[in-house]
Image: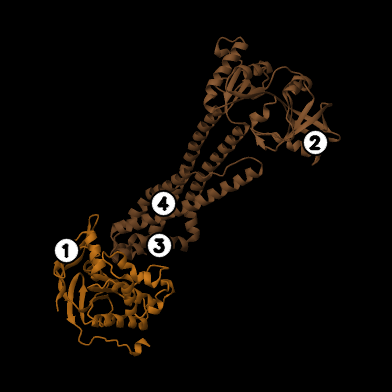
Amino acid sequence: MIIIDTIKMSLKNLRVNKMRSFLTMLGIIIGISSVILITSLVAGAESLIVNQIQGIGTNLIAVLPGASDEDGPPAALYGIVITTLKDSDVEAIKERVPHITAGSSYVTSTEIISSGNQKATVSMFGVDSDYPNISETSVDIGHFLTPEDKGSTARVVVLGSQVAEELFNSQIAVGQKIKIKNDPYSIIGVMKSQGTVGFQNVDNAIFIPITTAQRKVLGINHIGFARFKIDHQDNIPEASIQIEELLRDRHNISNPTEDDFTVNNTENALAILDTVTGALNLFLVAIAGISLIVGGIGIMNIMLAAVTERIREIGLRKAVGATSSNITTQFLIETIIITFVGAIIGMLIGTFIAFLISLGVNALGYDWDFVITPVSIIISSLFAIIVGLSFGVYPAKKAASYDPITALRYE
Amino acid sequence: MTELIKVQDLKKQYENDEIVTKVLHGVSFSIKQGEFVAIMGPSGSGKSTLMHILGFLDQLTTGKYFFKNNDTSNLSDDQMAEYRNFEIGFVFQAFNLLPRTSVFDNVKLPLTYAKNPGDINDKVKKAIEAVDLTHRTNNLSNQLSGGEKQRVAIARALVNDPALIFADEPTGNLDSKTGGQVMRILQNLNKQGKTIILVTHEKYTAEHARRIIKIRDGLIESDFKVTNHIEINDGDELLK
């Protein structure tokens, strides 16, 4: 009875003093909305990265040239050119390591291509015929590069969907020619649209045989990196070891610390990502927690002012039979309701902003999931109640401490 | 008539740091059920302190206080709250209504703290009816005139059907016409059997009661029946 009446009355007080209630709750609103927003953004960013990594393909092993430093990623990632990895290594791995269903060497560069007067700047990929299988994509029109194209260093090219659209509008590009560094290449296929994969827009790319890219475009005989598709996730560790052993054998390396290559797989990358986002979440939630405590202090301040303002009401309530614990309960419930309503508003605002951000990122062409984790909702609600309880106790005890005569006479 | 209140050699003193202020020096009297008594005295006489003790808002220092033949001289805070809720109704000079709260919710307030409130709706409606404010039931307290506010306060004092109603200068903030209306309601309640204690410093107001206990300097100066008490009837010129 008392509790229901108190809740009704607190809600009424909130309505009557709208501006004041809002300002009282502001700290909590900001705190809770940041918790919701931050956890949602971290989850969204994680989904973006996971989607990008998984977009490259699943069950993949990547081999990069250069040793893997314990303290950081392989040197190749910093743009340092290491020439130790060759296409022949890749061919040997494909031939000798079981569980591998597809594999390709990669060289990449940025090239300006032209068709008639039309020019375009594109990413050029020198790859094997296995590329569509590894990247889980396929050609839309025509066919992809063949092993024969690689063997004959043929001047043939497969266009990304966006390149085909830009250079040839809606006309059929297959059968026509484009120029790369002034040499003509026959278009044999156009890829399906795939969007951004591994943070790279593969629709704005062209694909030529790895050998052609090495000898006729770039003038090199090493490769950038290689990717292998494994038949089953469980076989990835075994295949990784076999690739390492084979490469050591081929490169005459006896001590693993002297490796001139790095074998990596997507699972490793995702595990690292998990650790990073976990730490990030904890750190950001701690900051939001501090803002909630600051908000709680603000609420305590206002409640103390409210107690002084309502001393006569306290006196009256005691005169008509309220005990001290009735008064304590009343003010405590009021504080909890303020924090709780603040928390709900904060959750709505945080969710709304997170939703807007996900819309924006998706509009930019990235695969960003809108995620509100139940954990963040539960943590926020609990925190709001704990803040309400702990910062409401002092004002409530103070309210209950007035004796009815003094309170009734208070001017 | 049975005895409602009996005080014996009641003394009250306040101790603040090392300063002792003696307010009541030993008063003894009794009030029977159904009486309408005015406790009268100038400010500083101790009449308010006496009302606070009789109304379970304050505790006596020495002496005895019997309420309905029970010794209530040494009650705990919670027991006093229960007595205030169940046995006493207060009407204050300053009305003390909850601001921006409906007449209904103001009158309901004592039932909120009652252990067995019973049919709350029915009790509140009857109390509002008793002060002729049914048409104002859903109005907010700040939309009422002074007289109406005091009638709401009386309804609030009545709602729990207490044994005793204290009216502390109930007409102090009202003009003579609305003050008259309030006194008439109190007299009507008394006629229906309610025991009423009126606390005032005005002789005129006190003369609406049937008995006057005069307090001066913490002692009873006189205690007498009012032979020609002022009776306000429903059709009186004063009320028009």
- Nearer the observer, disc 2 or disc 3? 2
Tell me the brown chain: A
Q: CA distance from mark 2 to mark 3?
A: 71 Å
Q: Check the residue under mark 3 and report the chain it is in.
A: A
From the image, tell me which residue sits under label 2. A173
Is residue B114 or residue B219 the one in the foreground?
B114
Is residue A64 or residue A295 the one in the foreground?
A64
Q: Amino acid at mark 4?
A: Met
Residue A70 shows in the view = no
Neighbour class for label 4 at 10 Å: few (<14), some, many (≥20)?
Answer: many
Is residue B22 or residue A37 the one in the foreground?
A37
Q: CA distance from mark 3 to mark 4?
A: 21 Å
Q: Amino acid at mark 1?
A: Ser
From the image, tell me which residue sits under label 3. A8
Instruction: Judge from the rendering whether residue B80 lies leftward or rightward of residue A136; answer left or right.
Output: left
| Label located before the other in sequence (2 or 3) | 3
| Label located before the other in sequence (3 or 4) | 3
Q: Amino acid at mark 3?
A: Lys
Q: Looking at the figure, which quarter contains the N terminus of chain A?
A: bottom left
Specify the label residue B73 is tagged with.
1
Is residue A24 or residue A176 the one in the foreground?
A176
Q: Residue at x 47, y 44 (%)?
A: A376
Instruction: Judge from the rendering whether residue B115 lies leftward or rightward of residue A23; answer left or right.
Output: left
| Label located before the other in sequence (4 or 2) | 2
